């Protein structure tokens, strides 16, 4: 009997010790498990934050590789008005005609105030060349324009006109210089230098340009015809693209319709 009681007592002690161990294990697991996991999550978050701070986001960092459009597609400026523009073009001679500017970029519109002509906007000192072969007609070597006047005869400043072999007169005004040897009666060939562009005459203080006029030949001094009777822009458009379009028909028709007439604008 005593031996049985002893065994029960020992068994009870063993159970008590086992239960105590289990409680201790549960307590340790409950107190350390989530904390350790929390610490690991916090450490990961801190590491991600450090990495993020050290490495800029894609939106903050510029791309080092150009896009295809940026590297291969040039931007094209679109104008609301009909304007021809060029970046130092290689201008052809076709059908005996060529664009009257060489060596510079230029711009012009399909409009001119008060009478038919066109202003070709171009830097000072660019080459004004013969648009076709012919003979020098009239030359102005002195700028006689007086600011504040409306004297049409001197508005062009330094000027050169030629009568082409086609019978049409071509006129360039507001020059900064007339080329050496260019005098009335001198024969010139298409593309030959006539002068340098500028802002003489009433273009002083304005954007430099070549005033370009097309008309028929007249007696000397009939400047209101010389400055322009037919719009040049259809021919400028054609010449710059290598089309030898001729103004002969249009000039003949206008001359027949109006003659030399008196001056009516800017006289």
Image: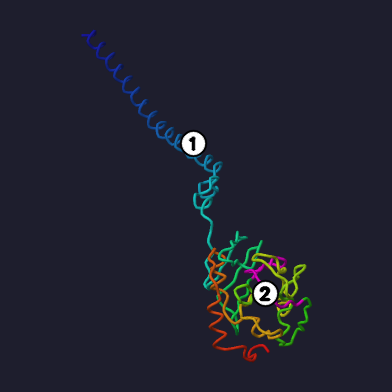
**Count of numbered marks:** 2
Residue 241 among magenta residues:
no
Can you tell which mark lies on residue 118? none
Horizontal and vertical percent for residue 127?
Answer: 69, 65
Q: Nearer the viewer, residue 224 or 138?
A: 138
- As displayed, is residue 247 above or below residue 189? below
Can you tell which mark lies on residue 162? 2
Location of the C terminus by quadrant is bottom right
Q: Nearer the viewer, residue 230 or 7?
A: 230
What segment is highlighted magenta in the picture? 121-140
Give the secondary structure at mark 1: helix
Horizontal and vertical percent for residue 180?
Answer: 77, 67
Give the secondary structure at mark 2: strand
Horizontal and vertical percent for residue 79?
Answer: 53, 69
Locate residue 211 relative to residue 62 in the image: left or right.
Answer: right
Determine the CA span between mark 1 and mark 2: 88 Å
Residue 139 among magenta residues:
yes
């Amino acid at each position: 009997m005593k031996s049985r009681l002893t065994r029960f007592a020992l068994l009870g002690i063993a159970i008590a010790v086992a239960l105590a161990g289990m409680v201790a294990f549960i307590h340790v697991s409950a107190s350390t498990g989530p904390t350790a996991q929390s610490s690991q999550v916090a450490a990961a978050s801190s590491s991600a934050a450090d990495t993020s701070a050290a490495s800029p986001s894609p939106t903050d960092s510029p791309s080092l590789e150009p896009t295809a459009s940026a590297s291969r597609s040039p931007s094209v400026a679109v104008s609301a008005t009909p304007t021809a523009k060029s970046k130092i073009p290689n201008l052809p001679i076709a059908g005996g005609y060529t664009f009257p500017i060489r060596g510079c970029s230029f711009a012009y519109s399909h409009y001119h105030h008060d009478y038919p002509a066109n202003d070709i906007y171009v830097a000072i000192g660019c080459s004004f060349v013969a648009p076709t072969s012919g003979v020098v007609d009239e030359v102005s070597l002195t700028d006689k324009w007086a600011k504040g006047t409306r004297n049409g005869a001197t508005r062009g400043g330094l000027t050169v006109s030629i009568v082409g072999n086609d019978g049409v007169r071509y006129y360039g005004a507001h020059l900064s210089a007339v080329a050496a040897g260019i005098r009335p009666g001198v024969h010139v060939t298409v593309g030959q230098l006539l002068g340098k562009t500028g802002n003489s005459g009433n273009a002083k203080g304005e954007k430099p340009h070549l005033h370009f006029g097309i008309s028929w030949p007249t007696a000397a001094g009939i400047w209101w015809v010389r400055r322009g009777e037919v719009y040049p822009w259809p021919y400028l458009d054609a010449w710059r693209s290598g089309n030898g379009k001729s103004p002969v028909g249009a000039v003949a028709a206008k001359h027949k319709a109006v003659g030399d007439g008196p001056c009516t604008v800017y006289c």
